[in-house]
Amino acid sequence: MLNCRQVSELYSQQLEREFNIREMLALKMHILICSACRNFGKQMRLLRQITRSAGITSEENNPPNNE
């Protein structure tokens, strides 16, 4: 089973890629028993919605390095 640190990393990666079946099941199993990670997931979804509605993209937050 995943630990809380692994779950928080998965939530962060969720913005960049889709999870495979194993990752999704492990995440769901963990959040069934961990209220802190459930809350963290809700906060991540809320932040995503806010940034989308404000028109902020990840590319604006990470401009290319022209060096």
Image (spheres, rainbow, N blue to C red):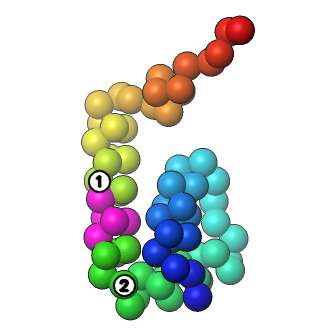
Tag 2's secondary structure? loop
Where residue 8 appears, x then y in whole percent?
Answer: 47, 64
Residue drawn at (31%, 48%), measured in percent from left and top? 47
Q: Which of 30 and 5 is in front in this view?
A: 5
Q: Does the CB distance between marks 2 and 1 fall below 8 Å?
A: no
Question: In front: mark 2 or mark 1?
Answer: 2
Query: Which circle marks residue 46 in the picture?
Result: 1
Q: Is 41 on the left-hand or right-hand side of 65?
A: left
Q: What residue type is labelled 2?
A: Cys
The CA distance from mark 2 to mark 1 is 19 Å
Q: In which quarter of the image is residue 40?
A: bottom left
Residue drawn at (37%, 74%), measured in percent from left and top? 37
* Secondary structure predominantly adopted by residues drawn in magenta: helix
Mark 2 surroundings: few (<14), some (14-19) or many (≥20) residues within 10 A? few
Q: Mark 2 points at which residue?
A: 34
Q: Does the magenta stretch include residue 14?
A: no
Image vertical order of residue 3 relative to residue 55, above or below? below
Image vertical order of residue 62 relative to residue 47, above or below? above
Image vertical order of residue 13 relative to residue 8, above or below? above
Q: Which of 10 and 15 is in front in this view?
A: 10
Give the magenta-colored segment's residue range: 39-43
Where residue 2 appears, x then y in whole percent?
Answer: 56, 81
Q: What residue type is labelled 1?
A: Leu
Q: Quadrant of residue 53?
A: top left
The disc, 2 or 1, on the residue closer to the chain's N-terminal end is 2
Tag 1's secondary structure? helix
**Considering the image in quadrants, where does the N terminus appear?**
bottom right
**Considering the image in quadrants, where does the C terminus appear?**
top right
In this view, the residue farthest toward the top is: 67
Residue drawn at (68%, 9%), measured in percent from left and top? 66
